[in-house]
């Protein structure tokens, strides 16, 4: 559902991992980690993990605030059983049409259950004068329902709206990008800075901006 193809936000999806096992993956590239829903946003374990990261900007999280994982397990078992039966009931078999209807229904149920629970995107931000932090936004679910669900596109849509995290059109958003660069790379209340100082601030800011 969230497989990366354009890789504008993340390059790899890690569903329900142990966080202590993904630190090296986050150091190597941008990762979307799917974390079990928690009553606290961000979950305490995620917050501790984020604070210990050096490459914070490589870390994006899909989670939620409703802990009903039992419904996910039930929907997954139904879909898995239907997929297993697919290999046992050939085309032309009297039960084939019923199986295909069940497969479509179970897939829709599974997708709806996942999206009902995993509906929050956590991403790193750093505002001027403040330290890096994880911000949370509801997953943008506006889409053309006549087309297959594209989770990567929904996360992109979430991060290009205010507060803006992702810039997909540099020319269109040039003024906003320039202002952000000035806030992060220039000393406060100064119009000029040495290139070496700007480059150093860029290396430090790159983990969250």
Image: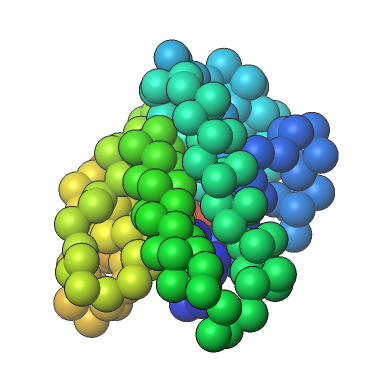
Compared across the picture, whether 142 is left or right of 28 comes to: left
Q: Quadrant of residue 30?
A: bottom right
Residue 10, visible in the rendered structure: yes
Above or below: residue 204 compared with residue 82: above
> Where does the image place residue 42, in percent across and percent down from the top left?
47, 24
Residue at 25% of width from left, 50% of height from top? 140
> Where does the image place residue 119, in percent across and percent down from the top left?
35, 38
Residue at 57% of width from left, 84% of height from top? 91
> Where does the image place residue 38, in percent across and percent down from the top left?
49, 20
Above or below: residue 209 compared with residue 9: above
Looking at the image, which is closer to me, 84 or 183?
A: 84
Looking at the image, which is closer to me, 164 or 195?
A: 164
Residue at 18% of width from left, 69% of height from top? 144
Identity of the residue furthest to the bottom in this view: 92
Residue 30, visible in the rendered structure: no
Above or below: residue 84 compared with residue 74: below
Looking at the image, which is closer to me, 13 or 133?
A: 13
> Where does the image place residue 107, in percent across and percent down from the top left?
45, 56
């Amino acid at each position: 559902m969230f497989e990366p193809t354009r890789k504008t936000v993340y390059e790899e999806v890690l569903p329900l991992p142990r966080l202590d096992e993904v630190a090296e993956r986050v150091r190597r590239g941008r990762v979307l980690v799917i974390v079990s829903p928690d009553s606290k946003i961000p979950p305490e374990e995620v917050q501790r993990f984020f604070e210990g990261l050096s490459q914070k900007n490589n870390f994006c999280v899909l989670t939620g605030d409703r802990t009903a994982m039992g419904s996910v397990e039930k929907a997954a078992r139904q879909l898995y059983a239907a997929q297993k039966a697919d290999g046992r009931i050939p085309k032309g078999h009297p039960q084939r049409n019923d199986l295909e209807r069940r497969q479509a229904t179970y897939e829709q149920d599974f997708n709806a259950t996942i999206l009902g629970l995993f509906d929050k995107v956590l991403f790193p931000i750093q505002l001027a004068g403040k330290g890096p932090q994880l911000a949370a936004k509801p997953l943008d679910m506006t889409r053309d329902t006549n087309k297959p669900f594209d989770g990567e596109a929904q996360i992109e849509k979430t991060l290009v709206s205010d507060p803006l995290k992702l810039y997909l059109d540099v020319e269109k958003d040039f003024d906003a990008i320039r202002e952000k660069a000035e806030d992060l790379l220039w000393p406060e209340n100064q119009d000029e800075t040495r290139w070496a100082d700007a480059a150093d601030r860029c290396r430090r800011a790159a983990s969250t901006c």
